[in-house]
Image (cartoon, rainbow, N blue to C red):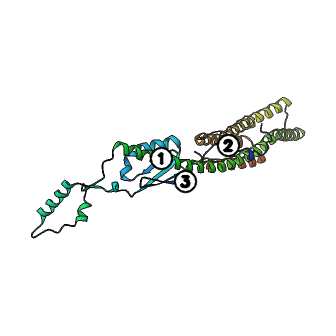
Amino acid sequence: MPDGRRDRKSECRPMILSMTGYGEAQHNEDGVSYALEIRSLNGRYLKISIKLPEALSLFEPEVEKLLRHRLTRGSVFYTLRIRDNTPQAAQEINPAALASYVRQLQAVALSGPVQIDLAALLALPGVCQPPEIDEATRERQWKALSELTNRVLDHLIGMRRTEGKSLCEDLIKHCRQIREHLAGVAARAPVVLKEYNQRLLQRTNELIADGRLQLQMDDLKREVAVYAERCDVNEEITRLSSHLDQFESLCRGGEQAGRKLDFLAQELLREANTIGSKANDAQIAHHVVEIKGAIDRLKEQVQNVE
């Protein structure tokens, strides 16, 4: 049976994280400037989109592994931009490819000398190629990239945690509203049975007085017992209260709780629907409507939790 509980909003020290976040950072090293931003939005699963400059595209599998190690849900967008001001940034010209293009142009010329636009030639596939990167350079680049990625992830997760605090407080508020109306259902349920017993007894006495009915008291008790069993919602109240305890515990106690919270919200709604269908009473129906409204708000907010 639900009991009165004091406002625990001030006690909410959440570990849950929101799936919405943003982080960015810059890094300069040996004349190379890195600018990284990571955005995350709501998503049922972890979906990662990575945009790297061509020169660093070989690191995409390692970047994805790093992101998956620290994030579990959401649509994540990773964008890295670099500006290389060093001489090594220049691409190497492939003389053989360039000579081949020149020969082909001369071969197709109809007559006279051929004027060649060198800039246009350099833009043709295979003429300019990125310089080969040795192992030491590759390790240095990955060290800078991984450190920058972790730094930006720290910012993003920090924002997710701040959002998670607001989510936790809002979820606990809705749970408190559900408990208040559940207490109203628990208080009203015995009264419903008593009122039904009184109405049945009154109607029976009226029929007996008119000589239209002969009824044994045992029959009356049996009818009340059947009604009581059919309308008993104590089990549903107990289960709903237990689900609320688990829900609040997850809000306060663990990261990556989104899927569990979503499941519990479904179970809360199931129990509320059962109470509404079993309890034949207008006041209980009012409480159930309020409970289901709060559960719907829970379900909506839970979609934001990692």
Q: Amino acid at mark 2?
A: Asn
| Name of the residue lying farthest toward the left | 111
Mark 1 or mark 2: whose residue is earlier in sequence: 1
Residue 184: where, in percent of width, then height? Answer: 79, 44
Q: Amino acid at mark 1?
A: Lys
Residue 236: where, in percent of width, then height? Answer: 71, 37
Determine whether, in the image, residue 189 is placed left or right of residue 245: right
Give me the disc on residue 273.
2
Q: Quadrant of the N terminus?
A: top right
Q: Quadrant of residue 246?
A: top right
Q: CA distance from mark 1 to mark 2?
A: 34 Å
Query: Which type of secondary structure does the marked residue at label 3 adopt?
Result: strand
Residue with the mark numbered 1: 47
Residue 202 visible in the displayed image:
yes
Determine whether, in the image, residue 134 is placed left or right of residue 291: left
Q: Amino acid at mark 3?
A: Tyr
Residue 102: where, in percent of width, then height? Answer: 16, 61
Residue 269: where, in percent of width, then height? Answer: 65, 43
Residue with the mark numbered 3: 22
Give me the disc on residue 233.
none
Between residues 23 and 151, which one lies in front from this camera angle? 151
